[in-house]
């Protein structure tokens, strides 16, 4: 009896958390006039897929998805390399001023980017990252490539590597670069996957920065397209919902893929 | 090995250069510039031509009812979200902290809203909170109707809008804190909990005297991160209510954004940003103090 109760409570709680997302998916398939009429959801009819075609066309989602994917890929890809390099230096190389410099980086972790968005916009403009199409696309990504938290996080993982790993490579005559690239980097792969995952979650939903920098229609990201559908009349709830679903699918797929990669590398590390 | 040391010291600058240069250009430099502008009457269109006006921007802000309202809203949001979300995340973590694979789907359910991005959820919840108009209503009001409660205007009600946004934000973020607590719980030695059980400690005593002390640093971390995130409130009210009705959901970030682009008063916007940074710095210091006590 107690077990049954615990199962029922779990099921109810799980459904409570999933209900809004399930509603989003189902409502995106309802005819416009029947979305908010729960009375006839159970009746037959009233289902349609036209919102998807309309949203795709009205919000120019094809281009917006490409822009969002390009932004996240650039931040995560370039960020992985740049932050891992710095993290490795802080963890494994000895040089003067290391602790002071690292302390300064740690302070930057708590800086909320949103608050600095306005002066950042001026810096981006001075560097020519706002003008044309390519410039604005770069402006969406470049300021977020270096990230204090990612440096801190990767440093922890580089520090946890056993010293023998390094000594063997030194005896082979490997320089700092080869140490980093062929020994240390492959050894922290789960941490790298985690960093990419965090970047994906953080930047797929970026809103304030794209709002300021991607002012031309052809540089709009998915979230901006969704906001445009949502705020510009005539409001078509079905189209908005379809757009919301389409804006969510890529991040779900990427998340699952990265998660599997994370688990797979952990499993492989366990075999060794 | 000495040669290796030397080559290390020579290589280090090249390893650090890309990240530190980017951080300097896109984080440190804008911050210093904002600090300088905050003491001038710089205009959005001609930031370089501002005159120094001392601390006038800061004193104006502290007296500005709109800014004070934005601060009060954001602080109230944090007060609503941080304690409840931390407690809820901890309880959920205790609940799903079981090895059987059947519990994995429940963890996934609690975590699902974290993966969906905030603008999507803001738009979605605007529809869920839709007030009743004839037979049409949002899901929240429809569910209230099932238990016989009267429908509410939610986002259009000045006294309910902020709590409604807080509830939605809690639902969105609790899964992430739950994961952090889960990781912490897995670090609590099983023998310790077992020993307490053998000594006759009940579930509550085990929680109070064994598990909670072991999780102290995790707890401090979760409270700090949740507070910092709560103060960054922007997307939800901006999309769901535009800061309204009236100024009842105006956030600090939105007020900075509007001071810049609507009032075009760059100097004052930068002063507001700096007041915000001071607050964040103070919060971070409190957290460090709290975390350090435990080590001592």
Image: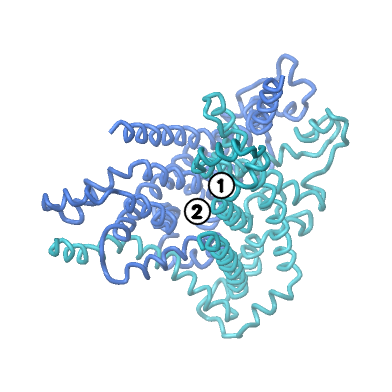
Q: Is residue A241 left or right of residue B8?
A: right
Residue drawn where x is 43% and y is 47% of the image: A71
Q: To which quarter of the image does residue A99 belong?
A: bottom left
Residue drawn where x is 23% and y is 49% of the image: A181
Q: Nearer the viewer, residue B182 or B67?
A: B182
Residue drawn where x is 68% and y is 51% of the image: B83
Q: Residue A198, image x and y in percent?
A: 46, 46
In the rendered image, which residue does mark 2 sit on?
A214
Residue reaching furthest front? B199
Residue drawn where x is 80% and y is 35% of the image: B141
> Closer to the N terminus: mark 2 or mark 1?
2
Q: Nearer the viewer, residue A233 or A3?
A: A3
Q: Which chain hosts label 1?
A: A
Q: Which chain hosts label 2?
A: A
In the rendered image, which residue does mark 1 sit on?
A224
Q: Is residue A57 left or right of residue A253?
A: right
Q: Colour of chain B?
A: cyan
Quarter of the picture holding the N terminus of chain A: top right
Q: Colour of chain A?
A: blue
Q: Secondary structure at mark 1?
A: helix
Q: Are marks 2 and 1 in contact (CB under 8 Å)?
A: yes
């Amino acid at each position: 009896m107690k077990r049954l109760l615990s199962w029922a409570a779990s099921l109810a709680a799980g459904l409570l958390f999933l209900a809004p997302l399930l509603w989003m998916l189902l409502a995106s398939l309802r005819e416009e006039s029947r979305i908010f009429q729960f009375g006839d959801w159970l009746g037959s009819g009233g289902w349609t897929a036209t919102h998807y075609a309309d949203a795709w066309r009205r919000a120019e989602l094809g281009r917006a998805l490409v822009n969002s994917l390009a932004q996240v890929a650039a931040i995560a890809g370039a960020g992985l390399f740049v932050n891992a390099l710095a993290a490795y230096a802080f963890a494994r190389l000895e040089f003067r001023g290391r602790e002071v410099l690292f302390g300064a980086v740690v302070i930057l972790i708590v800086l909320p980017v949103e608050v600095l968005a306005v002066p950042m916009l001026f810096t981006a403009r001075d560097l020519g990252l706002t003008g044309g199409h390519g410039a604005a696309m770069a402006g969406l990504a470049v300021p977020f490539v270096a990230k204090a938290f990612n440096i801190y996080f990767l440093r922890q993982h580089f520090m946890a590597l056993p010293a023998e790993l390094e000594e063997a490579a030194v005896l082979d005559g490997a320089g700092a670069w080869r140490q980093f690239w062929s020994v240390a980097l492959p050894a922290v792969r789960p941490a790298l996957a985690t960093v990419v995952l965090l970047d994906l979650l953080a930047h797929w939903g970026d809103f304030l920065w794209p709002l300021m920098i991607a002012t031309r229609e052809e540089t709009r990201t998915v979230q901006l397209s969704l906001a445009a559908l949502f705020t510009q009349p005539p409001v078509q709830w079905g189209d908005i919902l379809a757009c919301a679903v389409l804006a969510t699918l890529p991040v779900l797929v990427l998340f699952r893929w990265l998660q599997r990669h994370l688990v797979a590398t952990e499993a492989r590390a366990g075999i060794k | 090995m000495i040669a290796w040391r030397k080559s290390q010291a020579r290589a280090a600058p090249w390893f650090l250069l890309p990240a530190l240069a980017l951080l300097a250009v896109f984080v440190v430099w804008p911050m210093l510039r904002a600090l300088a502008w905050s003491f001038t009457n710089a205009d959005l269109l001609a930031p370089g031509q501002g005159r120094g006006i001392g601390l006038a921007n800061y004193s104006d802000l502290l007296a500005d009812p709109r800014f004070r309202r934005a601060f009060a809203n954001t602080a109230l949001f944090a007060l609503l979200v941080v304690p409840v979300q931390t407690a809820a995340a901890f309880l959920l973590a205790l609940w799903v902290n079981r090895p059987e694979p059947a519990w994995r789907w429940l963890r996934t359910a609690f975590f699902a809203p974290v993966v969906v991005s905030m603008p999507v959820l803001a738009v979605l919840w605007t529809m869920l909170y839709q007030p009743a108009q004839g037979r049409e209503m949002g899901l929240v009001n429809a569910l209230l109707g099932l238990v016989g409660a009267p429908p509410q205007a939610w986002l259009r009600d000045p006294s309910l809008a902020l709590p409604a946004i807080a509830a939605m934000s809690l639902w969105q973020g609790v899964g992430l804190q739950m994961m952090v607590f889960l990781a912490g719980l897995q670090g609590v030695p099983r023998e310790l909990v077992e020993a307490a059980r053998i000594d006759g400690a009940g579930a509550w005593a085990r929680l109070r005297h064994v598990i909670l002390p072991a999780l102290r640093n995790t707890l401090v971390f979760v409270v700090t991160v949740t507070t910092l995130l709560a103060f960054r409130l922007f997307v939800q009210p901006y999309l769901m209510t535009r800061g309204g009705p009236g100024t009842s959901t105006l956030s600090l970030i939105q007020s900075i954004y509007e001071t810049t682009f609507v009032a075009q008063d760059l100097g004052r916007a930068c002063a507001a940003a700096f007041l915000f940074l001071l607050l964040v710095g103070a919060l971070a210091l409190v957290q460090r103090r709290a975390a350090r006590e435990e080590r001592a």
